[in-house]
Image (cartoon, helix red, strand yellow):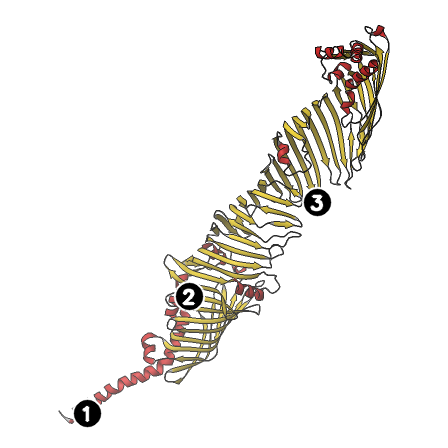
Amino acid sequence: MSGGLMRRLYISLIALAIIPLLLLMTAYAATPYMVQWGAAQWLTAQGFTGITLDIERPEWNELRVRQFTASKATDSADLLLETGAILIRFSPLKVWATQKVDLIELPASHLSVRLKDHVAAQQPNKPDVYLDLASFLPAVWFAAIPADQVRVGELDVDLDYPAGQPDWSLKGALLVESEQLYSRLRFYREGLDLGWGDLELRADNHFNLRLLQQDTPFIVIDGNLKAEDAVVLNANQLIDLQGLGQWLHRFLPDMELPVLSGSVSTQGIFSLPLQAALSPDTMLSQLESEHRFNTQATLKGMSPLLSNVALNLSGTVHVSDKHVVGNLDKGNTVTVMKPQLADVRMKQARVTLTRPIDFNTEMKRDGIALTNLPISGELSLSPVSMGKHRAVFSPVQFSVDSADLVQHQYKGSISIARLSLNVPDQRLPDISIKTDFDVDPQVLSTTFDLNTRELPLRVAGRSSTDLGRMSSVIQWTLKAVDIAGLEKQLRNYVSVVPAELTLKGGRLLHNGEAKIRDTKMHVNYWNAVNRADLTWNKTELNNVVWRSSGRYNENGWLNDRGTLKISRIFSGVEVNSLNTEYRFMREPSGEGTIKMSPVTASLLGGDIRINGFETALVPLNVMTSVDLQQLDMAEILKLEQQEGLSGEGRLNGQFPIMFDNDGLRISDGRLIADAPGGAIRFQPDGSVAAYAAANQGLAMALGALENFQYDTLEIKLNYAPDGTALLNTRLKGHNPDWNKGHPVDFTINVEENIPDLIRTLQFADELTEKLEKRYRD
């Protein structure tokens, strides 16, 4: 091999050795431009414009960016990103092989987002702009980040909203490494510090968000994103209500908020189509979510009535296409502890759902259109006290069969199986209540049934309330009551029911109407007793008919009118066809007056009349007179029940009566036989005749009475409040068949304590004894 050939070979070998080095040197020299070009290409691909990237290279594996700015304009917002010095560390071979650097470090970065008024900016008939949400998944972000690690020491984000909406800003730090993003940001609303939030994202689309209050998380959201037919967020959320309450107080310092404690947890999904509209209204219509929630919370200080409320709620919510469908689970409870009511004491009230609540509503611009919300529940009340009065309720069953929250129309029912009322010195029967209600913005209508459990009393009625004028009309009817034996049951509750009273039959009727307006009440009522039979001691009353109607006005006046008819009264003496009317008035002061019309009846073959009178109830002062007309002597003598005793004639009389707090007084009462008189005949039986045969005086008396023709019969009566009756009787006449018709003139004076006026007519025994004594002597 010649020397020239060797020289050329040597030069070639040197060139082969130098060329890679030159290539490496060229690549190294071109790396800053490669990084600059790559960054510009990446930003351009993301839609940024106005890119300023001033790069220097202090070291072989580091780049320093003196200044970086980039902007981006969309239909909804203008973005401006600015940073100070940026440090970029890289491996040249890695940059050429992967177009990624090792580190991007930003000591400070500022992102300004100016949001546009979408409604004002939108042009007529311009179609919505759509976003490819799949490109926003963390997995896509991480793949697009041109560095293994990104550190932002001070990150400022300003969100400038259109006029009339509050501006927000975020300040914090950000770290991306090992396909994970960590960020801690502080939130501000109109300059008000709202606290910290921690965000963690992973390349597998997992995320975790925590909102902090004094370094303690009060909202934690943990979930995963995936994109198939739609972008789906599957997340669990936990809210600590105490921290949320403290945060809200900072957020809304002027609003009075209750003290919160407890937690709310949710599990479920959010989903949007892969192509989602940028318009907020359209995006909202595309959003679909389905969650299960569980709430265990306590709220204190909401109001005096709701000073301490405990919630135990769970259920599901499904939102799609502006519709909300959900349910609350059976067994959910709301408990109010020690509600503060004027003059009322109660430990707690608890509402429990007895069946799930299913609801379906539509979200509109003017609110939520909830047209059906059926509710069934149970209200458990601890004993309720007011002063010395106490009420004990069985669980109250209630249901809302339909509810339209837009039209404010509701229908439902309430029932109480047992309500016990405790009143000092008064026993009351337990009652049950059932009511159906129908309410709209103008009128509240109800129907109700009230039953006493121990007494045969049932009241049914209805009411209507004008909610605008706050006036009500209530109507009720007592179901006809068979009063036989009712007095035995009433004595358990009413001490004034006399022990001498026995109810044997009849029906009690009652109905009424009340009108209420501006806390004033006007009442009309009607009472009746039909065909009642009863006894008082040994007095029988048959076919008693009572009618009563009354009115109570808003000024406190009570006016009651009634009639009383009794077919028969029997107490040794039979009274028939009693009729009377009365009027009772009570003034607002409580003073009462009764006015009686004349009482008329049939008595002893004639008539009796108690003349009308008027008296206050306190003190009682009755002044009247009893008129007796055409009493039949034959009927009077029958009262003696003496065989063979009969008579004839008519008697008339009047008895002035006064009754007051001292008692009954009769002054100068008279009963006189009608002219020309009458007769008294006594035909004794064999035993009496045999006895008279051995007794001359008795024989003479019986002889005079065999056919005694009287022309004068006069009875005078005075009765004192202590029960003493002074009876003066004068009988004058003759027996044409005895003692040659010689005249007989008897005066009989009787003084006894006689409670019953009827006994004053039973004088035959006294008369017989007088005749026997006179003629025996």
Mark 1 or mark 3, which is nearer the start of the sequence?
A: 1
Mark 2 or mark 3, which is nearer the start of the sequence?
A: 2
Mark 2 or mark 1, which is nearer the start of the sequence?
A: 1
Q: Amino acid at mark 2?
A: Phe
Q: Nearer the viewer, residue 367 or 556?
A: 556
Quadrant where the N terminus sits is bottom left
Q: Give the x, y percent position of residue 265.
A: 47, 59
- Which disc is residue 648 wearing? none
Give the residue at the far left of this rendering: 1
Give the residue at the far front of this rendering: 694
Which circle, 3 or 1, is nearer the viewer? 3
**Circle 3 — which element?**
loop
**Circle 2 — which element?**
strand
Q: Which residue is mark 2?
A: 207
Give left or right: position of 178 versus 76. Answer: left
Q: Amino acid at mark 3?
A: Thr
Q: Is residue 667 visible?
A: yes
Q: Nearer the viewer, residue 54 or 724?
A: 724
Which circle, 3 or 2, is nearer the viewer? 3
- Which disc is residue 7 wearing? 1
Q: Is residue 605 visible?
A: no
Q: CA distance from mark 1 to mark 2?
A: 67 Å
Q: Give the x, y percent position of residue 397.
A: 54, 44
Q: Which residue is mark 3?
A: 519
Q: Nearer the viewer, residue 27 or 345?
A: 345
Residue at position x 66%, y 28% in the image: 529
Q: Amino acid at mark 1?
A: Arg
Q: Give the x, y percent position of residue 744.
A: 85, 12
Give left or right: position of 271 versus 23. Answer: right
Residue at position x 31%, y 76% in the image: 97
Which circle, 1 or 2, is nearer the viewer? 2
